[in-house]
Structure formats: C-alpha cells, structure tokens
Image: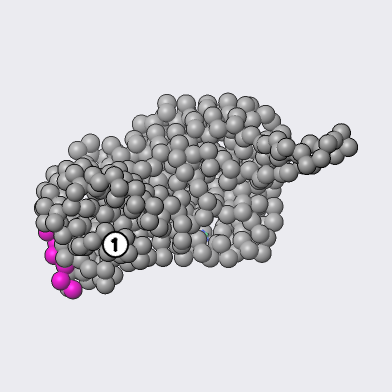
Amino acid sequence: MLLSQAHLSLIGHHLSAEPKAGFFPVINPADGTVLTHVADRTAEHARAAIALADAALAAWSGQTNKARSIILKRWHELMVDHAEDLALLVTLEQGRAIREARGEVIYGASFLEWFAEEAKRAYGRTIPATAPGKHLQTIKQAVGVCAAITPWNFPISMITRKVAPALAAGCTVVIKPSEETPLSALAVYELALKAGVPAGVLSIINATDAPSIGAVFTEDARVRKLSFTGSTPVGKALYAQCGATVKRMSLELGGNAPFLVFDDADLDAAVEGAIGSKFRNSGQTCVCANRFFVQAGIYDAFASALAARVNTMKLGDGLDEATHLGPLINAKAVQKVRRLVDDAVSQGAIAVMGGTVSVLGDCFYEATVLTGVTTAMAIASTEIFGPVAPLIRFETEDDAIRMANDTPFGLAAYAYTRDIGRAMRIAARLESGMVGINDGLIGTELTPFGGIKESGLGREGGSEGLDEYLEIKYISFAGL
Ligand code: ADP
C-alpha cells in the first residue's frame, strides 16, 4: 500500500519514493513491499543536531514550565487529531494490528498530556535551617542536552515517553528512532514542530548505522543524558560508552517476565490476562510474559482454556480490522522464534496450539501454546519476542518464586491468585520493577515503568519520569 497524501504531508521532506543514494527503504512486514525511502543520516548530522540542541538549551530551559507545558498540550492535541493517520503508519511499517496501533498512538500521546501537567509540579524543597540566619533549599533544573535511542516495537510511545518529560523539564533532545520504524517517528516529530517546539529543541536522526550515531551520542560531552530502550547487549555497550563523560542514563532493556498462575486463581481472568500480557503486539514487548509457571492443580485446565482462547485470535495483515495478531517485525525474528519452539519440542514440549511458521508468509508465526516446558529449555531463559506461551508446571509457592527469580532480568512479573496473603507475599518477593497481580496489562503514563537487575536503570512515566530529566541543586543561604 502506498502512503497517502495525508501521510506525506506529515513527513514529506525526509522521503523519496524512488531508491536514491543516501536513503534507506522502509519495508511493510505484512507483504514485503517497500513503503518509501527515508533520508539516512550520518554521524555528522548527529553532531550538528547536538550543536543545535546545545544552542537552544538556554532559551528553552529559561522559559516558564507553564509555557513548555502549553506546547506539549498542543502536541498532544495534534497527535489525537491525527490518530488515525499515525495508527496506519504504525501498522504499515511495524505490522501491528490496526486495532492495537490505535492504542499505541493514544498511549504515546498520553505521555505528552501527562508530562505537560507534571511540568508545573517540578517542586524543590525548603529544609529547616541548621542555624539562625540560614536558609536551605533545593531547586530542580533541567539536566541539559539529552539523546534518546528508541526501538521499533512501540514506535511512537517509546519516543514520547522520553521526549515529553525531557522537554517538560527544560531539556533539549536529539532522538534516533529504530531504522525499522522511521515513519511514525517522523510524523510525531513533524507534529511537535507544528505544536510550536522550537527548531533545535528537538531533532530527529534516522540512520541505518546505529553504532556510529550511538558513538557520537555517548562521546559528546555536551550530551548530559542518554535514554535508551532496546536490547540488553546494546544497552550494556552504551552504558560502558557513557562512562567516559559520566552521563546520566536511563536504560529500558530486555525482560524475561514470569506469569504465575496459582491453583486458587480465577481461571477466566488468568486466561484473559495471559492473552493481554503474552500476545499483545504478537508477543513483541519487553513486558510480555515469557515464562508461564502454572500450579499443578490448575495446569491442565489453564493449558486447554488458553489454547482455546488463542484459537479465536486471527493472524493476518494488520490493516485488516479483523486481525488480532500481525506479522513479526521481520523474517529473522520469525526464525528466532522457530528455533526456540523447535528446540523445546525436540526436548519433550508439546505444541497444543500453533508451533509453526504460518503459511501467510515468512514474517508470520502461528500463535502457540507449549505444554511440558522445563526451565532447562532455552525458551525459558531467552526473551522470545514472539507469540509463544511456554507453560512450566510447579508445586509450591516457594518453587514458583525461586524459578521466577532465577534470571538476570527483572522488568515485569505477573501473578494470578485470589488469596490476598499470597498476593502480598509474592508481590514483595518477585524480583522485578513492576508486578501485575491479577493484571496482565500494567503500562500507563501515570505509573513508573522500569526494571531492576539487568533489565535497566531509571523509570519512565509517573512523577518519577520527570525526575529522570531534572538535576537537584542544593542551595545554602547564610548571613540572612
Ligand atoms: P532490537 O533487537 O529491539 O531492534 P536493538 O537494541 O538492536 O534492539 O535496537 C534498539 C535501538 O538501538 C534501535 O534504534 C537501534 O538502531 C539502536 N542500536 C542498535 N545498535 C546500536 C549501537 N551499537 N549503538 C547505538 N544504538 C544502537
């Protein structure tokens, strides 16, 4: 499908319909067609954008928080007004079902509204003085120039979740979106300019040579903070690279979320929670349930109810309104899922639903439920990033917690139980930054999103999200 006039008017000047030197193709994973070509930026562009961000910083951070808030609100309104066009772009370049793409746009826009409101609440403190004639206080000030590197799985909200608090705080930002999803990013950027974000305060670098852009972002001393969402190996490398200039960092890395179902769970609720947590975006989110630990007494009932529910979901082109599950981002992602499932099956797991690449094409994998999985299988320790639910059996609460925590990751965890004592015990004991108790969908703009252990550093969203872009300055006045 070609891009419509409405899309082109949002992102026109960065595009070429024909292949051209210095441009890279954007592929629709549903059918392999080239949507358009996007200008491929270089390290030099990244340095120029940082220079612009540095030059724009004093004026932007010097405005009142309310003035910045008004611009963010206007940006939010523009995103809501263009929600349908943005959703189409997300589906076209990322594959996600259109019904979910609409949610991604509204979720993305919600961070603009939330941080427009929070901008006005960047309070400092007055601290009781230690001596007469003294006054002790703290103020919060913008961190400075920030760089952001974002992934393809939430091509809009991963940008706004970083940029909205940064701009609200008075920072300026250079974003490098994923090369898989440059169009949604460009559209959101163009709307920011329309909303009144001044030139240089926000710049966008679409580039295929991600390491060279990452090197500029991390080496340049003018960049005071890097926020990254993506894979753990890249995040670790960027963390090390930021050491030389001691930058502040936010890292949202991989997960290996456990999903615990106890014998006393509400079975229907657990199945619906599993569908939301596991199959959203065809399993391509970092908070997707990766390992289902199901207690022995409910294991068979849960497996058959989940398989029956999965069977009602339609796999297909995301543009079809009836589609629940779109293609994965590319054929490589499908092959990774295929290898993990084949390996588990070769060791005794049973695919009670799915278990194969779809006949729809090499970017489609069938929604899958695996029983008889053990923690020794690679699928239990690898982030699947696909529509596969591996079910592992457990006997006692202690066993479930021990297995759930036996991972270097700690982003999200889920548990279904009707026992309030157990719910409170396990919420405290699960080693993760976020826990859903009888809740499979936990992300909101109002709450702090983030991980512990190797899943990352810092929090995005909530009031905590603004603090990530503010420095605290302590001021002691004496001789008053
Ligand atoms: P994924 O597997 O989800 O694509 P990546 O970590 O590879 O995860 O990608 C997330 C983001 O990081 C993308 O914008 C990608 O271009 C960028 N990226 C990948 N490698 C590097 C790197 N070495 N330095 C900086 N950014 C990188």
In what element is the residue under mark 1?
Answer: helix
Q: Is residue 477 visible?
A: no
Position of residue 115 measured from the top left corner of the image (x, y, whole percent): 53, 34
The residue at the point 19 percent across, 49 percent down is 264
Please determine whether, in this image, residue 125 is positioned above or below residue 333: above
220 with respect to 150 (left or right)? right
Q: Is residue 350 visible?
A: yes
The residue at the point 19 percent across, 38 percent down is 322
In which quadrant of the rendered view does residue 219 lie?
bottom right
In which quadrant of the rendered view does residue 376 lie?
bottom left
Position of residue 112 measured from the top left corner of the image (x, y, whole percent): 50, 34
Please determine whether, in this image, residue 409 is positioned above or below residue 427: below
Residue to which mark 1 is pinned: 398
Please determine whether, in this image, residue 182 is positioned above or below residue 217: above
398 with respect to 316 (left or right)? right
Residue segment shown in magenta: 347-353
